[in-house]
Image (cartoon, rainbow, N blue to C red):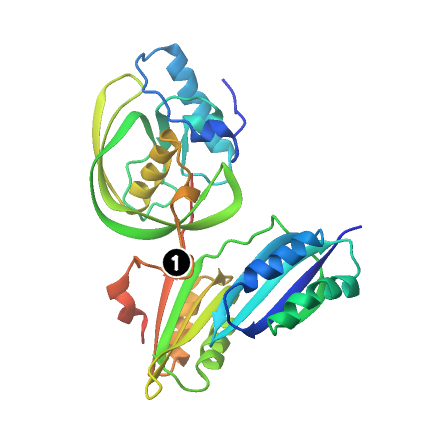
Amino acid sequence: MAIRDILVYPDPRLKQVAEPVERFDAELRELVHDLEQTMDAGPGAVGIAAPQIGSCRRVIIIDVSSRPKLKNHGRLYLVNPEIIHWEGLETGREGCLSVPDYTGNVVRAQRIRVSALDPHGRPLELDMEGFEARALQHEVDHLDGLLFLDRLVSRRHDLFKRKTYQARKDKP
Amino acid sequence: MAHWYMLTVVGADRPGIVARISQCLYQAGCNLGEASMIRLGGNFTIMLMIQTAQPRRQLEQALRPVTEELALSLHLDPIEGHLHEHRQPDVRITVFGADRSGIVAQVSGALAEAGLDILELESSVAGSRQHPLYIMQLEGVATRGIEALRQALAEELPQDIDVRIEPIDTLVG
């Protein structure tokens, strides 16, 4: 069990589609543990996916509880996660452990329903919104060989403003 | 030993400016760094970091055929090229109103006093000739927090200007 090196773009392993997990054994538990240690060692990451440490398996961790004002489920260890429903779109800023020194705007679904297994193989179904939903979508993209760079939208023109109709509240 | 320069290019917009300038720099053995290129009021503008071992005069000479043919004015300044040190903005501010003089001075003055450090700013004059509209979008670091910016604008913002202040919470995953 260890903190592992984070693969950095353009490492070709980040472009692979990860394989579903079929066995919930000691090897999986070790992978989850390494993922967690590596995420916690990094600078302020709210999620990590197994391909980022060179394991081509469909395993992610997300944890946005560092933003206590935002709705969240705490720390989630998800195996074979799937987005089974989504609604709404919003633009937000993302960066990535695998893409140092760059952040960009990405459009993501606002609300999602996720089905997954926990590390013991028990099924889960979760409703997520906002920042937590964004974190999950970012990590699931890693499982499909996609980086946020693949989804960048213009930094200058915000197509889907986050709070369009609250504009006047900012005015005195 | 290679040095960094900031190349500034301005001229009436026409197709091919970026391609011609960058080809010329590539042939002259320059490495390009970060850039901002945008059309402003019918002019095409380039701010481009260039790394080269050539002396300034030689680089200007290499670019001259292109700048003369495309009627571009060009300027080169030696700079420090600090790459891989991006600062992350934590606030985005959108300002708009019927165009008049003083909008930028009033808004940026109030925000600067409240601790805003601007990292990028873009503005347009839109609307019609009869009713021009000024729109400005900027991103920066609120060194004294976003609430300080809101308060400063609440106290000092003229009533004819609309402002939206949004936090940028960057997700790292």
Q: How many marks?
A: 1
Q: Residue at x 37, y 26 (%)?
A: A17
**Dot 1 surroundings within 10 Å: few (below 14), some, or many (20 or more)?**
some
Q: Residue B130: horizontal and vertical position, in percent?
A: 33, 89
Q: Residue at x 28, y 36 (%)?
A: A73
Residue B147 appears in the rendering: yes
**Foreground: A29 or A17?**
A17
Say if B104 sits above or below A74 in the image.
below
Q: Residue at x 74, y 62 (%)?
A: B59
Residue with the most extreme bottom position: B130
Chain hosting mark 1:
B
Q: Quarter of the image holding residue A15?
A: top left
Considering the image in quadrants, where does the C terminus of chain A appear?
bottom left
Amino acid identity at mark 1: Pro
Q: Quarter of the image holding residue B51?
A: bottom right
Q: Quarter of the image holding residue B52?
A: bottom right
Q: Residue A141: horizontal and vertical position, in percent?
A: 36, 35
Residue at which label 1 appears: B167
Residue B82 appears in the rendering: no
Q: Residue B165: horizontal and vertical position, in percent?
A: 37, 65
Q: Residue A44: horizontal and vertical position, in percent?
A: 47, 41
Q: Residue at x 65, y 72 (%)?
A: B68
